[in-house]
Image (tube, rainbow, N blue to C red):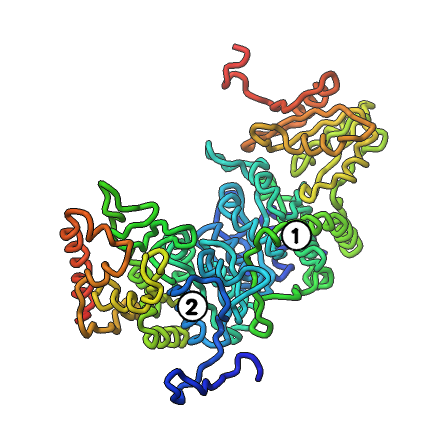
Amino acid sequence: MMKKVIEGSMAVAEAVKVCRPHVISAYPITPQTHIVENLSQMVADGELKAEFINVESEFGAASVILGASVTGARAYSTTTAQGLLLMAEVLFNIAGLRLPVSITCANRSLSAPINIWNDHQDAMTVRDSGWIQLYAEDCQEVADMQIQAYKIGENPEISLPVMVNMDGFILTHAFEPVELIDQKIADEFLPPYKPEVYLTTKNPVTFGILAEPQYYMETRYRLQQAIEASKQVIEDVANEFKKVFGRYAGGLVDKYRLDGAKTAVVAMGSVVGTIREVVDELRGKGEKVGLLKIRAFRPFPKEVVYDALKGVDNIIIMEKALSLGFGGILLNETKAVFYGKEKQPRMSGFIAGLGGRDVPNKSIIKAVKKAESEMLEDSFVDLREELIGIGE
Amino acid sequence: MAKDETVANKKTVAGKRKKEPITESLVAPGHRACAGCGELLAARLVMNAAGKNVIATCATGCLEVVSSAYPQSAWKMPWIHSLFENPAAVAAGIEAALKALGREDEAHVIAQGGDGATADIGVGCLSGMLERGHNVLYVCYDNEAYMNTGVQRSGLTPFEASTTTAPSGKISWGKTTDKKTMPEIAAAHGIPYVATASVGYYKDLEKKVKKALSIKGPKYLQIHCPCPLGWIHDPALTIKVAQTAVQTGLIPLFEIEYGKVTSVRKIVKRKPVEEYLKLQGRFRHLFKKPGGEEEIKNIQAIADENIRKYSLI
C-alpha cells in the first residue's frame, strides 16, 4: 500500500473511487468543493467509471442519489452546512426508504451570520434523520471511514444511509500522509452492492408508499431497531477493516489513555487530535487525564460510553455544536447515559470552535483546569468578552 | 390467463364485437380517486400507452395518495414516490443508475407530478433534469390547483379561478395572474420534445406519449385534467369540460420540438369562453358579481391570444 502526502479532500475522493460508486451527484459548496472537483476529474479522465450528475441544488443531489440507490446502484454525494440543510427533507426520506447511500459532510457552521468555517452545527441538526453519523479525526480516518460506511450501510440487516463527517478546512484542506487503499483489496473488503429489492421491470415493486396511522409506527420502530443494530455492525466492520488493512481508528468510540484516569475529555472530529496532545502533556505531569473519542454519534453508543467513563470522577465534554435553547448536545446525551446509574461523575460542557475559531492546546488545558474545581454547563471557550460587553 | 395479457372484450353495451382489444390497465382499478377524476384517467392513459417497460416516479399529491396506500398499490410497473418536489431528480437518478449498471434498455423512465409539484415546488429539479439531458419523460398532470390539500392556488391555476387561498370575494375575482407558461418554459430548455394534451382527447394524448417515448432525451408532456371536486363540476362532465377548454382556445394543444412548434390541434368549432366557465363552480362569481362581464372579456382575450399565437384556427 502506498502512503502519500495528499489533501484531505483528495483522500476522500480516492477512497470514494475504490468504493466504485455507480452514481455521484453533488452541488458545489465551500469547503466541500475539492472533493467534487477531484471526483469529477477522475471521471473525466476515465479513472472512475461513474455517472457524475452535476445538479441544480443539494436538494437535487440528494434526490438523484436516492433515485440511483433505489434502482440498485451504489451512490455518493458530499455537501456541508447550508447544502446539508437544503438536503434535509431528502435525508429523512432516504433513511425511511432504507437506502444505503453515503454522503461526506465537510462540517461547517450555519448561517446567519454566514461563515464558511468548521463546526458541527450542520450535521448535528439532522442527527434525528435516521442516518448513521460517523465523525473522523484526521484525513486517514476519513478515507478509511468512507469505505467502511458502505460496508456498514449495505449490510442487509441494517440498510441505512451513512454520513461521514470531516471537519471543513481543518481536514478537507489539510495535507497529511495518507495510506491509499488499493483497489484489489478494496474489492475484497467491499463487495458489489446487491440489494434484495430495487426498481426493475423484472419485479415491479411500489416504493414510497403512503402509511396510514395503522402502519406508520412500525416503520419507525424498524428504523430504530436497524440503527440500534448498526452499533454491532460498526464495531465488526472496524475490526474487519483492521484485519484487512492493519489500521484501526476505533469502532463506535476510541479510548485513549483512559486506564486509571480520573478525568476524561469527550470529543468528536479533528479537535480530538489536539486533545490527544493535551492528554499526553498532562499525563506527563502526572495528571490522570484520558480521552474518549466519539466516532459514531448516531447511533449514540450509550453502552460503550458508559463503560469507558464509569471509572472517572470528572467528565469534560468539548463540542463544536449546541442545541439553541438547551445547550451542548454531546453534553446532554452523555448526561443521559448516566441517568439511573449508581456512579454519577461530574460533567462539564464546553462549546468550542464555533465558526472555525481555533481551539488551541492552551484553551483545552484551561477548560480541564476550570472543570476540576467547578461544574460548568455550556461554557463557551475563548469567548471574546470585549465583543459582547462582558467585563467592561 | 397470465396477468397483463391482452384480453379481447367480447361483449359491449351495444352487443357489437369491439374492433380494438382492451388491454388490462397498468394502473389498476380500485384506487381511491374521486368519481370523474381527470388525473387518474390521464395517468392510466399515459401508462397504458407507454406499455410495460417503464419505471415511474411520482410526486406527492392526489395521484400518489389515492394509488399507493399500504398495503395496496395501483401501479403495475416499478414505481417510486419520494417527495413533493423531486420526481424529476429521482427519475434522473434512476436513469443514471440504469446507464451505470448497463440496464439502459430495460425501461423508459417516466416522472409524474401534478401542476404544483411541477410548476411550483419542483420546477428547479425539473429544469435541472431537462437541462442535463436525461432520457426521461416528465408528465405534468395539470388540474390547476393543489387539489390534494384542498384546492389551493398554484402557478398553473388560471386567471380569476376561485381557489381556497385565492378566493373570489367582495373585492377579489380570484387569481390575479394567468397560468405560468410551463410548456414554453420547458421548451426554452431546447429539449427534443414538449407537448400539451388533454384527457378530452385521448387518442391525441396516447399518440403524444408514444411519440415522446420514441425520442431519446428529456421530454415534457403537460396534460389538462379536470378535477370535479376542485373545479366544482358534475363528475360525469369531466371529458366535456376538458374538451370545452380546448375548443375555446384556453388550453391549446401543441407539440414543440427543439423550441419550434411542429403541430397544433386545430379548433374545428370554436366556442366562447363562457361555455367553459359556466360549467364550473370555480368561475361562478364571474356570472354573479356585478362587473363579471368585463372580467369574462379578459378571459376571452387570453383564449384569443392563444388562438393567434398557436394558429389554432
Label 2: chain? B
Residue drawn 23% across the image and 59% down it: B278
The quadrant holding residue B242 is bottom left
Quadrant location, the C terminus of chain B: bottom left
Residue A47 visible within the image: no
Return the x and y of residue B288 as percentages of the image width and height.
Answer: 20, 50
Q: Amino acid at mark 2?
A: Ala
- SS assignment at label 2: helix
Residue B181 visible within the image: yes
Quadrant location, the N terminus of chain B: bottom right
Label 2 crowd (10 A; few <14 / some 14-19 / many >=20) = many
- CA gap between label 1 and label 2 equals 31 Å
Return the x and y of residue A163 as percentages of the image width and height.
Answer: 62, 48
Residue B43 circle label? 2
Q: Residue furthest top?
A: A392
Label 1 crowd (10 A; few <14 / some 14-19 / many >=20) = few
The total number of labels drawn is: 2
The residue tagged 1 is A218
Residue B176 circle label? none
Return the x and y of residue B10 as percentages of the image width and height.
Answer: 45, 87
Question: Vertically, is A113 above or below A24?
Answer: above
Q: Is residue A389 left or right of residue A348?
A: left
Along the line of sight, the residue nearer the viewer: A320 or A140 = A320
Q: Is residue B241 left or right of residue A85?
A: left
Q: Amino acid at mark 1?
A: Glu
Along the line of sight, the residue nearer the viewer: A248 or A378 = A378
Label 1: chain? A
